[in-house]
Amino acid sequence: MAAWNIVRQHAIIAGIEKPISPHTFRHSFATHLLEGGADLRVVQEMLGQSSIIATQIYTHIDRSFIKEVHKTFHPRG
């Protein structure tokens, strides 16, 4: 059975209604690494991408995370 079908079946079982594919895990992996403090360049290497721009596309930063980083690192945060 194709990986895509396995992911889709388990998403349905889990009650996930949003479209999901194996590629979704790649996006999530990159985002979780970045939110956990990993350097974007390291994430790029882990994903095996030649372009940092492609890596940036993979990461989806939550607005609350942006606020948290601002509060932590900005002198007036």
Image: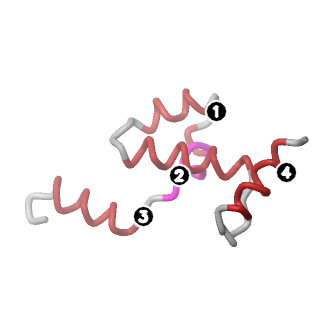
Mark 4: which secondary structure?
A: helix
- Decide which of tag 3 and tag 1 comes sooner along the chain: 1
Q: Amino acid at mark 3?
A: Asp
Q: Nearer the viewer, mark 3 or mark 1?
A: 3
Where in the figure is residue 64, as x and y percent of width and height?
Answer: 33, 67
Residue named by callout 2: 59
| Residue located 54% across and 34% down the image | 44
Residue that mark 1 sits on: 49
Question: Can you identify the residue that label 4 sits on?
Answer: 5
Mark sitting earlier along the chain (4/2) = 4
Q: Which residues are magenta?
A: 54-60
Residue furthest to the bottom in view is 17
Question: Residue lying farthest front?
Answer: 13
- Mark 1: which secondary structure? loop
- Say if mark 3 contacts mark 4, CB within 8 Å: no
The CA span between labels 1 and 4 is 25 Å
Q: Looking at the picture, does residue 59 appear above or below residue 2?
A: below
Disc 2/disc 1 C-alpha distance (Å) = 13 Å
Which residue ends up furthest to the left in the rendered image? 75
Where is the C terminus found, in terms of image quarters?
bottom left
Secondary structure that dominates the magenta span: helix
Q: Amino acid at mark 4?
A: Asn
Looking at the rendered structure, the kind of residue marked 1 is Gln
Between 59 and 11, the one lying in front of the other is: 11
Could you say where residue 15 lies in the image, as x and y percent from the top left? 66, 68
Q: CA distance from mark 3 to mark 4?
A: 28 Å
